[in-house]
Image (cartoon, helix red, strand yellow):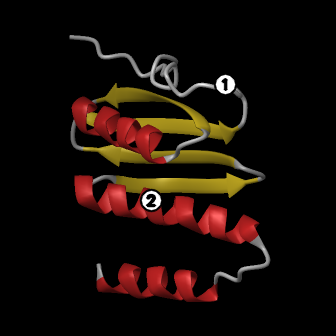
């Protein structure tokens, strides 16, 4: 965790006031890493390009994967995110994608209604 924290500090120090794009991308990376470490998620793949994010990883349960996706959806304000979870022989993998500005709504009240992560009991 200390290694990650030092990388986090370097990212924050190197963020220049002129170019906001790296700051935006670095902020997303920090959110993903923080939430993954906090919830015990193993990240397999993270790609951020042109305000689009793609994350793949492994969790210890279906619920853990869904909680991680939901946490990211809450943190990535202004991005439309959706994810899927698969179980294969006791291994739970997930894939989440999001992009900025796909659904430009003037109000925030419907922001939580269009998540495609379903809770099946």
Q: Is residue 60 above or below residue 104?
A: below
What residue is drawn where x is 44% and y is 59%?
A: 31
Q: Position of residue 70 (x, y in %)?
A: 37, 35
Nearer the observer, 67 or 109: 109
Q: How much space separates mark 1 and mark 2, taking CA atoms?
A: 23 Å
The location of residue 13, given as percent across then percent down, is: 56, 88
Q: Residue at x 47, y 17 (%)?
A: 113
Name the residue nearer the viewer: 63 or 87. Answer: 63
User: Residue 42 falls in which quadrant of the image?
Assistant: bottom left
Q: Nearer the viewer, residue 92 or 25?
A: 25
* Identity of the residue furthest to the front in this view: 107
Residue at 29% across, 37% down:
67
Instruction: Answer with mark 1 or mark 2, whichever residue precedes in sequence.
Output: 2
Front-lying residue, 56 or 35: 35
Q: Residue at x 25, y 39 (%)?
A: 64
In the rendered view, tell whether residue 67 sits above or below residue 12: above
Q: Disc 2 marks which residue?
A: 31
Q: Quadrant of the C terminus?
A: top left
Indicate which disc residue 105 carries.
1
Q: Which quadrant: the N terminus?
A: bottom left
Q: Is residue 61 left or right of residue 79?
A: left
Mark 2 element type: helix
């Amino acid at each position: 965790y200390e290694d990650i924290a030092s990388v986090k500090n370097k990212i924050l120090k190197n963020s220049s006031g002129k170019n906001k794009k790296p700051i935006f991308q670095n902020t997303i990376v920090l959110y993903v890493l923080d939430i993954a470490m906090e919830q015990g998620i193993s990240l397999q793949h993270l790609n951020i390009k042109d305000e689009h994010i793609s994350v793949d990883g492994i969790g210890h349960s279906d619920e853990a994967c869904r909680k991680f996706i939901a946490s990211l959806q809450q943190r990535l304000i202004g991005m439309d995110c959706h994810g899927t979870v698969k179980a294969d022989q006791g291994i739970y993998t997930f894939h989440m994608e999001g992009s900025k500005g796909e659904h430009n709504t003037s109000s925030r009240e419907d922001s939580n209604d269009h998540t495609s992560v379903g809770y099946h009991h």
